[in-house]
Image (cartoon, coloured by chain):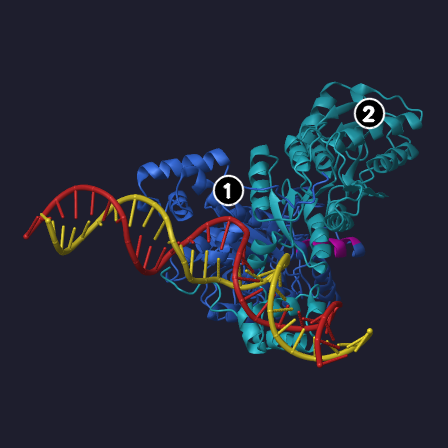
Chain colours: A cyan, B blue, C red, D yellow
Amino acid sequence: MADPRLVRVTTPTLRDVAQLAGVHPATASRALNPQTRPLVNAETARKVLRAAESLGYQPNPIARSLKTARSSTVGVVIPDLTNPLFPPIVRGIEDVLTTAGYNAWIVNTDNDAGREEALVESLRSRQVEGLIVATARREHPLLVRLHDQGVRMVLVNRKVDGLELPSVAADDDAGVALSVAHLVALGHSRIAHLAGPQGTSTGVNRARAFRHAMIDHGLPDDPALTVECGYWSESEGALALRKLLDTGAEFTAVVAGNDLIALGCYDVFAERGIECPLQISVVGFNEMPFLDKMRPPLTTVAIPHYEIGGEAARLLLDTIEEPERHPRSVLMAPSLVVRASTARPAR
Amino acid sequence: MADPRLVRVTTPTLRDVAQLAGVHPATASRALNPQTRPLVNAETARKVLRAAESLGYQPNPIARSLKTARSSTVGVVIPDLTNPLFPPIVRGIEDVLTTAGYNAWIVNTDNDAGREEALVESLRSRQVEGLIVATARREHPLLVRLHDQGVRMVLVNRKVDGLELPSVAADDDAGVALSVAHLVALGHSRIAHLAGPQGTSTGVNRARAFRHAMIDHGLPDDPALTVECGYWSESEGALALRKLLDTGAEFTAVVAGNDLIALGCYDVFAERGIECPLQISVVGFNEMPFLDKMRPPLTTVAIPHYEIGGEAARLLLDTIEEPERHPRSVLMAPSLVVRASTARPAR
DNA sequence: AGAGAGGCCGCAATCGTTTGCGTAGCAGAA
DNA sequence: TTCTGCTACGCAAACGATTGCGGCCTCTCT
């Protein structure tokens, strides 16, 4: 208030344009909006456009939102931007959104339900037209409530039990099938699984896929060889591997729930002087950046992050335009990228 | 679900609260706002608050923005979220912003001036109250124009020539001094510098600091031993090192402009069968994540990303509250983290 | 020539808040 | 009692756009 200048000095409004063009603001509005342009005479439309151009008029999205209850904005809710999995997805989302004239509001929940609820509330009060959610848990009261309220959303990577929502994710089954096949081809038969949190759909899907893949190869599906991580993190991966090692179980390879869990294994290898891949092979999941420069470079299953984000955005735009359309889900094909963390078993 | 309505079914407005409390909306508004609450009788204020509470009233930020030309939102403009340097900074920004009741709008410019201009324009039209800018180049017409127009901003990591703006960055001088001292202590004397883009203040600062450090140690400051990278990227780092190697210059260590450039060196080492650190030592800058798991683990100078973000946000909040305050800049102290990419020179 | 039909456009309300201004009411002072 | 001053509140005008409704004008058809 001390400073009268806020962000802008003074910006031309619709009235200015109308005045310059010699028409009523309503007419100017109609002329400027391609949707309603047919309602005004082509000649006056031209005049208005010229006036807008010459003034450098930019419609005020706030005023527009207030009137139309729309915002050309969607909310993107992710657990943590710091997890390298998410930035590429976000970029994918943004890129298709902006070409469609939309914007993305990004929020981090830190896996905290209270925080998540507050953030979503704040997004809604900003009239976002939909949500792209990457934080889904299998039990997720907030998301079912939002769904019941008719909030448009699409899920990324994970789903919630019993909720029919559009979603896009990597094909987990195919991904771990690839991993297991690779290890089996190398000669491994005692393979362990460091599963992601079983409270997330991805966690259980990959674990189930792991069992199936083992069976398909005629290998024993030993429950003692899979241990669950509480979070998708390095430290939890390390914890899980230590636990497994301490049981004295025998195994020559581990397929990790994701790359972070796999990297957690590296820490344990260092602690206990285990040689990877000589003594134990590891394969990750997600192909996060810089894996090729790790020690050893991590074999992992690559998923098209950027495309997943883009596809999610497209799905959301679809449901915004056609709310009644039946929810469809898309699975993106993964591929295995073999590096130096996997090799033939020693014996 | 068959609900054509947008995000919200129907949300209580200020009028509803006022009606329930039996007062005029103006009074309700004043009662709800702590700033103006003293203007209304304590008893009626209580009534209003209770009404608001019972309705679950949430003020509509859009309407408020329209009226007040404020938004409790600041824009954060970064080059690319995918660069692991930025997520922690963004988190730092967000965390102090939200505790102050503000929100952050994040945009990626991809180092494209046109894109940047459009994005900033869109931020301004959304009435952001200030900008946190991490894309500054030494010559940056857009930023000087914004500054002239009185847009509040603070710079992160980089500055623009001749512009007095609040900024927060790591102490580059101290950082490279640390690196060089470390290498000299190991016995290196022929040290090369793979400089960042000289169009950015950080690029020239670190290069200058490198020269000074060399001189301080009584070592020759050989211009042939520093080569500039066009971008802060792996590929540019690789390019620069190849160029340097191809000149036949002699050196046993390189201090890289940042971690990505250093990692680019790793690629060249692999290409040409160079052993690091046996033949060449490398030190990076920034301490991006997972460096400890690289091959070899990269010695680098660590800077407090999260705190830098937080400090930037605080600075911006300061200038929002006290626009006339003289711009201050803060330098954060770096520290060297020694890993396995540096060792005594072979001969 | 008169009537009906559209095409164009202006009027004014509206979205939900904030805020300058005016005023009713009341207390205290003269 | 009358006047002053203050507190507490209501009125209404904004902020900048969108949009239903209605009216004018012109054109066409009979």
The image position of residue B143, as x and y in percent, is 53, 68
Residue type, mark 1 in image:
Gln
Q: Is residue B63 magenta?
A: no
Task: Look at the image and tell me whether residue B139 can be seen.
Answer: no
Identify the residue at image location x=52%, y=41%: B12
* Label 1 neighbour load within 10 Å: few <14, some 14-19, many 20+: some
The image position of residue D5, as x and y in percent, is 18, 53
Residue where numbered disc 2 is placed: A251
Identify the residue at image location x=71%, y=34%: A261
| Vertical relation: B326 (above or below) A197 | below
Residues drawn in magenta: B262-270
- The quadrant where residue A215 appears: top right
Which of label 1 and label 2 is nearer to you?
Answer: 1
| Foreground pick, A303 / B244 | A303
Residue type, mark 2 in image:
Phe
- Quarter placement of the N terminus of chain B: top right
- What secondary structure prevails in the magenta region? helix
| Foreground pick, B175 / A60 | A60
- Quarter placement of the C terminus of chain B: bottom right
Q: Give the side of residue A251 with respect to residue D22, left or right.
A: right
| Vertical relation: A108 (above or below) A52 | above
Q: In what element is the residue under mark 2?
A: loop
Chain at tag 1: B
- The quadrant where residue A190 appears: top right
Marker disc for residue A190: none
Residue where numbered disc 1 is placed: B58
